[in-house]
Image (spheres, helix red, strand yellow):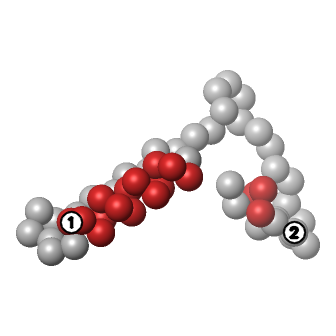
Amino acid sequence: MAIEHGLLENQNLIVVEPPGQQAHRDIGLVWRPSSSRRDSFLQLADVVSELL
């Protein structure tokens, strides 16, 4: 994702695709059970899910 947004601009580096499957990442959202912001975190999780 960073490469697509210009991370390597003006750098003397070359991007090489790894063989096999396309790279991916898992994103998780974790909070303490005692957190008073549970509802806020659930709303954030919904927004992230919609964007992905």
Image depth: mark 2 or mark 1 in front = 1
In the visual, does 15 lie left or right of 1? right
Q: Nearer the viewer, residue 32 or 12?
A: 32
User: Residue at (38%, 56%) from the top-left corner?
Assistant: 45
Label 2, secondary structure: give it: loop
Amino acid type, mark 1: Arg
Which of pointers 2 and 1 lies earlier in the amino acid sequence?
2
Q: Left or right: where does residue 10 sit relative to residue 29? A: right
Q: From the image, tell me which residue sits under label 2.
A: 9
State the residue at coordinates (90%, 72%): 10
Task: Determine whether label 2 and label 1 are within 8 Å by CB.
Answer: no
Q: Label 2 sits on what residue type?
A: Glu
The percent coordinates of residue 1 (x first, y second) are: 68, 55
Q: Which mark is residue 38?
A: 1
Q: Position of residue 17 (x, y in %)?
A: 76, 39
List x then y, in percent, for residue 40.
Answer: 30, 69
Q: What residue appears at the point 15 percent right and 71 percent down from the top-left corner?
A: 35
Vertical relation: 9 (above or below) 28: below
Q: CA distance from mark 2 to mark 1?
A: 40 Å
6 on left or right of 35: right
The crowding category of the residue bearing disc 2, from other C-alpha atoms within 10 Å (few below 14, some 14 to 19, many at least 20), is few
Name which residue lies at 71% across and 29% down: 19
Occupied quadrant, residue 7: bottom right
Q: Secondary structure at mark 1?
A: helix
- Residue 8 x/y as whole percent: 82, 65
